[in-house]
Image (tube, helix red, strand yellow):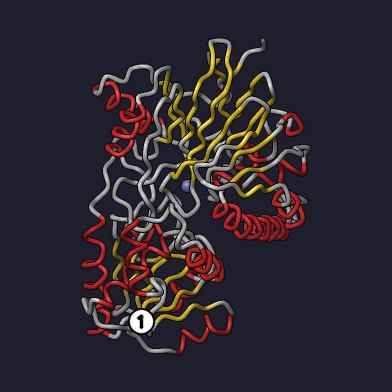
Amino acid sequence: MSKTKISFHGAAGEVTGSRHLLETPAGSLLLDCGMFQGHRNDAQKKNRSFAFPPASVDAVLLSHAHIDHCGLLPSLYRDGCDGPLYATAGTAEIAGIMLADSARLQVGDARFYNKIHAAEKLTIEPLYDEEDAKKALAHLKPTAYNTAFAPLPGVEARFLNAGHVMGSAMCQLDLDTEGGRRRLLYTGDLGRQEGLLMESPVAPEGVDYLVVESTYGGRLHEKLADAGEKLAEVIRRAVATRAKVIIPSFALERTQEIVFILDRLFREKAAPEIPVYVDSPMAVSLTEIFSKFRDDFSFDDKFQAYARMDGDPFGFDYIRYLRTKEESQALNNKKGPMLIISASGMCEGGRVLHHLRNNISGPENIVLLVGYQAQGTLGRRLQDGQKLVKIFGMEHEVAASIETMHVFSSHADNNDIVSFVKACAPRRGVFLVHGEPEARAALTEALGREGIKNVKSPAPGEEFELN
Ligand SMILES: [Zn+2]
C-alpha cells in the first residue's frame, strides 16, 4: 500500500495562500486553493505556479470563499485540474461573486501595470480572467453540512460548521493509512467562541490529525458586547456635528455584522436613527445571500431568533443599498449626519477611496476603522495618525477624526483555539497553519501548557506521512 501524506503549499508560516495537499492511495485531494496576498513581486512568484501538477489533483474541498482560500481555483482548473470542487451551498454562492470580482481585479491590475511600465516595455499577464473563473465554478458541487460524501474512493468527508463567515466549513476526512483508518480535521479558518452572526464551531470526536489555523496565536479579542455602545456613541456625535461617518469595511461578513448591530440599535432606540448607506455592489450582493440563507443552521441561534422577530435583520427605515456609480456619487452632495459603509476594508481600492477623498479633510467627519489594517495600506496610515495622505495620487490633509474598533474579528483568538484543540484531543498530531511565525510559536507554547505536545509548524512545501 502506498503512503498517505499531507503537504503544505501556502499559509505555512504566513496567513494567506492556503493550499494543503492530501495524497492517499486512492488519489490526491486539495484542501483550499488560496491566493497569496502581499507585495506584488512576492505574490507574482507564489501565485504563478503550483508546487504540484494541477492535473494530479482528483478533487478539491473548499473551506470558505475568502480569496486567500479560493482565489487560485481559476488557475488550478485552467492548468489541468478536472476534478469536482466541493463546498457548502453558501460558500458556492459566495465564491461565484468573489472569483468574478477577483478576475476583474486581476485584469484591471495587469492593464494598469502594463500602462505605467510601457516605457520600460515591462508587461504582466493577468493571473486569470472571468472565463477562467467561470470554468472553475462549473466544477462546484454544493454539499450540505454534516452529510457524508466521497471525494475519493474510500475517503469519507463531511463539512462541519466552522463559524468563521457565512458558509464556512471545517473538512472532516476519514481515510485509510498504513496504520489503519484515521480521522483528519482541517479547520479552514476557525470562528470565535463568541460570534455575532455565525454559530460557534464545535469540535468533533475521534480526531487523529488536526490541521488548525493560528492567525491569532498569542492574542486575545475584545468583547463583542461593547460594539453596539461604541457605534451608538459615534452616531450621537455624528448627529451633533452633522458628520459623515465613513466605515471602510470588508464586503463579506463585517458589513453584515455592522448592519445587524445598527438594526438592533435602532429597533431598541439606543441610538438616534440616521441615514445609512451600504455603498459597495459586492456587499449588496453578499447581503442578499445572507438573507437567502438566513435559516441555514450555520447562523447563530440568537441571530436567527432576532431575524424571525425583526423580519429583516439587514434592513431598517433609513438604510439604502447602493449599486450604481451615480447613486454613490450622489452622496457627495448630501449633508450629514450619515453613515457610509463601503469597501475595501483596508482602503486599498473600491468606492471607499472616493468617500475618503471627499470627506477626510472635514474636521467634523469621522473615519471608523472596523477591521485589521495591514502594514503598507492607506487604512494603516490613517490608523497610525498620518496627517497627510495620498489618495489617487493627490495629497489630502487628514482633519477628520480617525477611530478604531478592535472588537470585530471573524477568527478564533488564542484562547478560542486552545479550547478547540483541547476539545478535539487529536490523538496523533496537530499542524499549525495560517499564522505568522510569532503566532505559531505563542500558540505552540500555550498548547504545551495544556499538555498538547505533538504540535508541528510546517514549513512551505513540507510533507508529513500520516499513519
Ligand atoms: Zn477566511
Position above or below: 427 against 110:
above
Which of 44 and 287 lies nearest the eye of the viewer?
287
Q: Position of residue 35 (x, y in %)?
A: 59, 44
Q: In percent of the image, x 50 and y 60: which residue is there?
A: 348
Decide if residue 199 is on the left or right side of residue 189.
left
Decide if residue 202 is on the left or right side of residue 37.
left
Residue bearing the label numbered 1: 338
Using the rendered view, name the quadrant where residue 346 is placed.
bottom left
Amino acid type for the residue under numbered disc 1: Met
Position above or below: 1 against 413:
above
Ligand 1 has an atom within 8 Å of the beta carbon of the residue at disc 1: no
Using the rendered view, name the quadrant where residue 267 is placed.
bottom left
Decide if residue 229 is on the left or right side of residue 66.
left
Which of 423 and 245 lies nearest the eye of the viewer?
423
Q: In percent of the image, x 67 and y 10: which residue is there?
A: 1
Count of labels shown?
Answer: 1
Q: Position of residue 47 (x, y in %)?
A: 65, 40
Position above or below: 315 against 349:
below
Mark 1 is surrounded, within 10 Å at the Cα level, by few (under 14), some (14 to 19) or many (20 or more) other residues, namely many
Which of 452 and 107 lies nearest the eye of the viewer?
452
At mark 1, the secondary structure is: strand
